[in-house]
Image (spheres, rainbow, N blue to C red):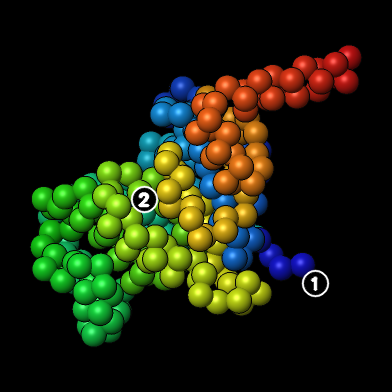
Amino acid sequence: MTEMPLLEIDDLAVNIGNEPLLSGINLTVAPGEIHVVFGPNGSGKSSLIKTIMGIPPYRVTSGDIRFEGKSILDFPIDARARLGIGLAFQQPPPVRDVSLSALGKALEIDTDRIAAEAARLGMTGHLNRGLNDGFSGGEQKRSELLQLLLQRPQLVLLDEPESGVDVDSLKLLRSVIEQLFQRDRPIRERTVGGIIVTHTGAILEHLHATRGYVLVNGKFMCSGAPLDIFDQISANGFGNCLAEARIKEKIHDFLKE
């Protein structure tokens, strides 16, 4: 019996206002899989992540997003979070009137567990401060991952978790991300899947991600093994991928004639 995918994105098109942002997006994430999205600035990577989470002002104009087989297009953000979808923002907004400690208690997390997870991430002194209020870039990244550790989502969405992070902090964040994706378990026992948006590729070490995609101008232009794609981007930028996509389009148009 085939296991039901965690996430299915079917021919998705997204606008902001009347401006198209994404089109023809197809992606399926099964339990235990990590999919990686690369692309230049402004290509739509963050827009895709936020659309899955249901964050305004992104508006789905066609296609579908299904979580565990059920369309979530009409679900608000909090309902998607309750289903088991969690997002770590690239640049999280400050929430001055809500502390990490209060958030953990709202999630009905044991106080000792909140303290233990915070200590691991060096966030003990931040538990009673306003969420991300006055946090440095590195503290914001650790705060976002702490929230995911407390939530324990089935579908993890990470938007450039390594951006603005120094080498020492990166090692810590990488180990937490491995925990979120259950990399300490045998493959067949992993139930969590997700999507990582990345520029540097540094976060991919030891994760053994499933598949990578290059998003340009709101479309997936090519896909393949994540580390192979990252090596190509590092050596040649996005040129090879765009050239490959143009060839495929010409072949497709030729076959249609």
Q: Quadrant of residue 223?
A: top right
234 lies left or right of 212: left
Percent position of residue 178, x then y:
45, 65
Q: Residues within 10 Å of mark 1 (few under 14, many from 20)?
A: few
Secondary structure at numbered mark 1: loop
Tell me which residue sits at (54%, 47%) in the image. Answer: 36
Identify the residue under disc 1: 1
Q: Is residue 75 visible?
A: no
Q: Quarter of the image containing the C terminus? A: top right
141 lies left or right of 156: left
Percent position of residue 129, x then y:
10, 63
Identify the residue under disc 2: 161
Q: Is residue 193 visible?
A: yes
234 lies left or right of 136: right
Percent position of residue 250, x then y:
77, 17
Residue ranking furthest to the front: 235
Q: Which mark is residue 165?
A: none
Three-letter amino acid code of the residue under disc 1: Met
| For discs 1 and 2, the disc positioned in front in the rendered view | 2
Tell me which residue sits at (33%, 55%) in the image. Answer: 170
Judging depth in this view, the residue of 135 and 105 nearest the camera is: 135
Tell me which residue sits at (15%, 71%) in the image. Answer: 124
